[in-house]
Amino acid sequence: MKKILSILMLAVLAITAALPAMAETTAAGDGSIALYIGSPLTLSAGVIKPLDPDNPNVAAIVHKDRTLVPARAVAEHFGAEVSYDAQKQAAVIEFGGKQFIFYFNKNYYDLIQTDQPAKRVTFDTEALVIENRAMLPLRVICEDVLGKAVSYDSNVIVIGDKLVDLAANQTLRESIRAKIGQAVKVSSLWQLKTLLSNSINQYGAYGGLKEAVPETSAEAPAAEAPSPSAAEDSAAGAGRDYSTTNEQVAGIEEADLVKTDGKFIYVASGNVVSVVKADGRDMTLTDTIRMPVDTKTGQGIHISELYIDSGRLIILGSKNQPQPRPVDLPATMDDAVSEPAPAEPVTVDAENDLRIGIMPPYYSKSFVYTGVYTITDAGKAELLKEFELEGNLLSSRKKDDTVYLAVNKYNYYYIMEDVLPMLRDSAKSDDYKALSVSQVMYYPGNTTPEYLMVAAIDIRDKETPSTVEAILGSGTQIYMNDHALYIARQDYSDPSGTTTSLSKFSIDGLKIGFAGGGKVKGTLLNQFSMDEYEGHLRLATTRWAGETTSAVYVLDSQLNVVGKVENMAPGETIYSARFMGDKGYVVTFRQIDPLFVLDLSNPKAPRITGELKVPGFSNYLHPVEEDLILGIGQGTQDIYTRNQDGEEVVIGTRTAGIKFSLFDVSDMGKPKEIQTLTLGGSGSYAEMLYNHKAILFDLENQMFAFDGTISDEYEGEKNRVNYFNGAVIMNYDAQDGFDVKGRLESLPAMTYPQDGYYYSWVRRLCYIGDTLYYVQDGRIRAFDKETLAPLTTISIY
């Protein structure tokens, strides 16, 4: 199913890089603008912009066989002034010394000119208000008001000084389609059902849709005067010195199981969150937040991660809701398909009827849960608002007072009523309601019974509703900065090799808008394989196509590939990547660990400037100084055997402990591994090897810490292994190397409370001031940060 889908998606996106920009091919003259039916984007002078930056749901539509466009977006592009007359319920356009008054839900406008009587002009469809925007007939606003020519073919619209033959100029038409028409809004529930029905039939998903019936067009609501919204000022507490979660992008927060705000420590475990006031050796459990459990089904909310910000605690989790689904027993091969006579009872041979043993399919809905709590000065939590969205959490981010969710909803089971994802937003109602059709987009010619949704949640105001945008598709990795969210999808079905497809969303508080798509060869390792710098997105990928190769691609703001370095390290796979400003660092591995240094200062001509080959490999790269990178991974040992001549030969490698490296990259042409330490032997392991949030950093004091298992062979006894399990605190220095400052051995796991709730063991380290806290399996232990002397221990369950 996904194989066919991905090939179609790539075909749509591939045109973007291959065709010339509109500015280079159109004869419409300077200042022309291109639109696409159903797309929230515009194209002018080769630059893609949102049609309405303040409302990403606005798009050109077809109504009663006439195209309607947003008045303000089109008119202001050509220098007109647009205002709203609340008393007249009309949009007013002033252009060329004339005033045009369009009345909502009417099929006429008034033309006002100085020293001339008003003139009423009729047209063949009415002006509407959709998404709180005035929508006017395309040719009326362009030809009558602005005096511009309209070119139209195959959903592509070009507005300018001259007509363009789009039917004949297929290069221009397809270039516009590829740039702004690759994803469009679903126009109706009927269209959505048709798209899903076709995809189910094509991909063989379980069940099926009933016949899709066109929905009745609702009367457009009358416009109301827009009211300004004011965001609540969030007080940023001064606080004291304390640790934060290790995150990729400055200013973009990532969630984790343990958080601290410098006064309290918050620990998520199972369906319980513990709030602990931490002041050195004085620790007090101030509150315990227990997620409700359905007594009938036993289903509850499993907490996956937390955010904390200025008196707000945000809990993210998942929940399942079993759904009643009546399923007819399928007919056996010998049954006749006919309507039974109503007067005769139907008898079943319980011994021989095979249908008795058929279990109806289990059907449940999965929801991503978000709970926003206020935290008092005393450490008490009170629920402020809740938000639930059907699907599974891909990842989340937080910027200022907004939490963003990326959610996948896989529709393997279909019934007619479930074509739209369900959500519950306590800011509106406590009831579950379906997502609006106007919030769904799709890739033309590329539909799938899956939803990729992006939600934005305000954490300050109880009454502010959340926003959701959806597209038929899915995601596997995300990257977010202060203005954009990129979601990548890996595709293994392209016959020429693996590929990554990208969807870009603009973000601004609660405003989310689809901003374009693109694709590159290969697949991403993790979120650190993506990074944006000065308007260019950089990606590090590994591609399997006969031979394994790696590459770095540079894309512009329109997601066109403008530069690339391909065929890096043939036969090897990327194990880690990190982009820092105009430099990039990539580690590949097969038997040795090459560290590649890339100069990305010229986006159109990226190049490898240096390469360093050392034993082992780094799973994670972290900048600790401007020209100093910490690599964390695993060491390797060669595996030998003797050949027929009695000579030792290498037949492979095995991991050999957790390896730490300091790389000096001050000379981009000659990177150096200036310090290294391998901790433990084969079998050593730590969560930080695959989860960067499991590492505690204190760069000011050149310290980091983690929880893990370290295996050490007894001297002289290679078959006997000693395992240390607990926290390791380390220092690093470019001159003196690495030093294990201390180890905090873990204590036996605590017994779960028998209180009807479930718990999971969590291990993290954090610090507040001069105290180091080790969260370990139901307890928090406090230590002097400098001497590691134990201070106190508290149970949090």
Image (spheres, rainbow, N blue to C red):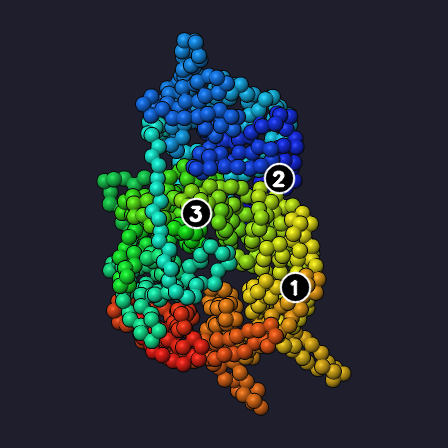
Q: Which residue is mark 1?
A: 666
Residue 127 locus on image (x, y percent): 40, 23
Residue holding disc 2: 15
Q: Position of residue 590 (x, y in %)?
A: 65, 67
Q: Residue furthest bottom?
A: 716
Type of amino acid at the residue the image marks with label 2:
Ile
Q: Residue at x 43, y 14 (%)?
A: 111
Q: CA distance from mark 3 to mark 2?
A: 26 Å
Q: Which residue is identified by label 3? A: 454
Against 507, residue 394 (above or below) is: below
Q: Earlier in the sequence, mark 3 or mark 2?
A: 2
Q: Residue at x 39, y 33 (%)?
A: 131
- Relative to residue 269, is residue 85 depicted above or below? above
- Tell which of 218 and 120 is nearer to you: 120
Circles 3 and 1, Cβ within 8 Å, touching? The answer is: no
- Kindly identify which numbered label has been placed on residue 229: none
> Quadrant of residue 338 in the image?
top left
Q: Are marks 3 and 2 in contact (CB under 8 Å)?
A: no
Q: Tag 2, which secondary structure?
A: helix
Residue type, numbered disc 1: Ser
Residue 797 horizontal/vertical position (percent): 30, 71
Horizontal side, residue 194 vs residue 563: left or right: left
Q: Amino acid at mark 3?
A: Val
Q: Closer to us: mark 2 or mark 1?
A: 1
Nearer-N-terminus badge (2/1): 2
